[in-house]
């Protein structure tokens, strides 16, 4: 049995604009998915998942959906989780040349699903590392990131950026521009997260921004302006200037809102954080619902968020220096 964990992430800057070649800066957080992998005697894949925001579930199948037993959770959640694990295992079979090998896979995660915190990337990264090690192969972080990216690319019909998977595999703060991903220096950030209990539809939100860009020149300018914010944000990160980072996050949120990807609950949480004198706050990830990220070294924002209608969970998250971790 091999067990690995991998962190989720927040976007400090640049989601959506990154789809159009602008840079983005995601940052790994100490909220992790843990994946245990044990080789089986046959070639089946059995997945047991707990804490994936709904009831735990167990699915066993031999490669065909007909083999799946009835289970009491949403079919779409099962399909989503199975799709990622299935493809992650396919990547491991490919990289290790072990075509026929089967596994029991156990997933535990404290990252809300589909809420802009990179839950699927964390599961995929941890699964690839653990499955490869179970077969006696130790992959470098870059190789894990590449295989995890291919997994998301496959499962999400070609709609995946490298940001989540690279950040989860390597940890720390990351700069992504097109296919170029690299780690960057970041100070210890006082990250606070607010979660509205929901999730946005990434495909629909990305399509909405694309339509706006095609219809209005000023929407295209807005996307470019986000790129300018990211470049200034990188300087502020390098200088450890939290006040400037907060101002830029506020600006970034305003532009994301203008592009139609915020929501009432995300805006309400952002305003609650601002009223609590956070340095700044913005939505993180695709938007439409899910999480905001704020910077505040005091307990004020977390407290304010916990009393904010529509905020289901508020928590502090340390920056995760380490990406994938080998636990067993
Ligand atoms: O919600 P997340 O964490 O999957 O982030 C989506 C980020 C987008 O820029 C909107 C899309 C992408 O693939 O980069």
Image (cartoon, rainbow, N blue to C red):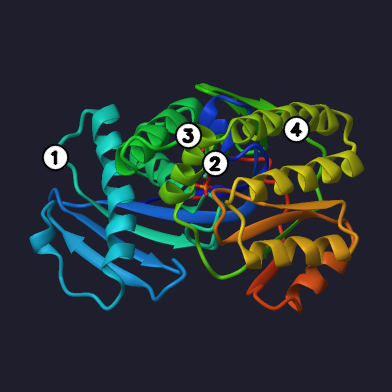
| Location of residue 135 (image quadrant) | top left
Mark 2 lies on residue: 168
Q: Residue 159, labelled with which disc?
A: none
Q: Nearer the viewer, residue 222 or 201?
A: 222
Pointer 1 residue Cβ closer than 8 Å to ligand 1: no
Q: Position of residue 138 (x, y in %)?
A: 41, 31
Q: What label sits on residue 229 in the rendered view?
A: 4
Residue 41 in the image: state x and y as whole percent: 15, 51
**Cβ atoms at labels 4 and 2 below 8 Å apart:** no
CB of mark 4 near ligand 1 (< 8 Å): no
Q: Secondary structure at mark 1?
A: loop
Q: Where is residue 126 shown, x and y percent of the image?
A: 45, 46
| Mark identifier at residue 161 | 3
Nearer to us: label 4 or label 2: 4
Answer with left or right where residue 81 lies relative to residue 41.
Answer: right
On whether ligand 1 comes within 8 Å of the CB at mark 3, the answer is yes
Note whether residue 45 is visible.
Answer: yes
Q: Which residue is painted at 36% across and 60% down in the image?
A: 106
Residue at the image position 52 percent from the left and 23 percent from the top:
178
Chain-order first, disc 1 or disc 3: 1
> How far separated are the C-alphas under marks 3 and 4?
19 Å
Q: Nearer the viewer, mark 1 or mark 4?
A: 4
Along the polypeptide, which appears first: circle 2 or circle 1? 1
- The residue depicted at 56 percent of the width and 53 percent of the height is 116
């Amino acid at each position: 049995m091999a067990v690995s964990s991998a962190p989720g992430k927040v976007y400090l800057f640049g989601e959506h604009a990154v789809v159009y070649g602008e840079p983005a800066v995601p940052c790994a957080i100490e909220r992790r998915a843990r994946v245990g992998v044990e080789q089986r005697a046959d070639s089946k894949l059995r997945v047991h998942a707990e804490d994936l925001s709904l009831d735990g579930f167990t699915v066993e199948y031999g490669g065909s959906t007909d083999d799946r037993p009835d289970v009491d959770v949403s079919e779409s959640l099962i399909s989503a989780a199975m799709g990622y694990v299935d493809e992650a295992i396919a990547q491991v079979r490919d990289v290790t040349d072990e075509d026929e090998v089967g596994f029991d896979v156990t997933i535990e995660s404290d990252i809300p699903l589909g809420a802009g915190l990179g839950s699927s990337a964390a599961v995929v990264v941890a699964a690839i590392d653990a499955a490869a090690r179970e077969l006696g192969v130790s992959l470098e972080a870059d190789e894990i990131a590449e295989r995890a990216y291919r997994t998301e690319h496959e499962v999400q019909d070609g709609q995946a950026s490298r940001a989540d998977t690279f950040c989860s595999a390597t940890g720390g703060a990351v700069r992504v521009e097109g296919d170029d991903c690299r780690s960057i220096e970041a100070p210890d950030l006082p990250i606070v997260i607010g979660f509205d209990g929901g999730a946005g539809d990434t495909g629909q939100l990305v399509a909405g921004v694309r339509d706006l860009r095609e219809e209005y020149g000023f929407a295209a300018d807005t996307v470019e302006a986000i790129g300018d914010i990211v470049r200034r944000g990188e300087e502020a990160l390098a200088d450890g200037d939290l006040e400037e980072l907060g101002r830029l996050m506020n600006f970034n949120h305003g532009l994301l809102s203008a592009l139609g990807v915020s929501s009432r609950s995300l805006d309400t949480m952002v305003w609650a954080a601002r009223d609590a004198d956070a340095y700044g706050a913005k939505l993180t990830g695709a938007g439409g619902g899910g999480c905001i990220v704020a910077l505040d070294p005091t307990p004020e924002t977390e407290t304010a968020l916990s009393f904010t209608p529509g905020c289901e969970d508020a928590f502090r998250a340390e920056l995760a220096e380490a990406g994938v971790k080998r636990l067993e």
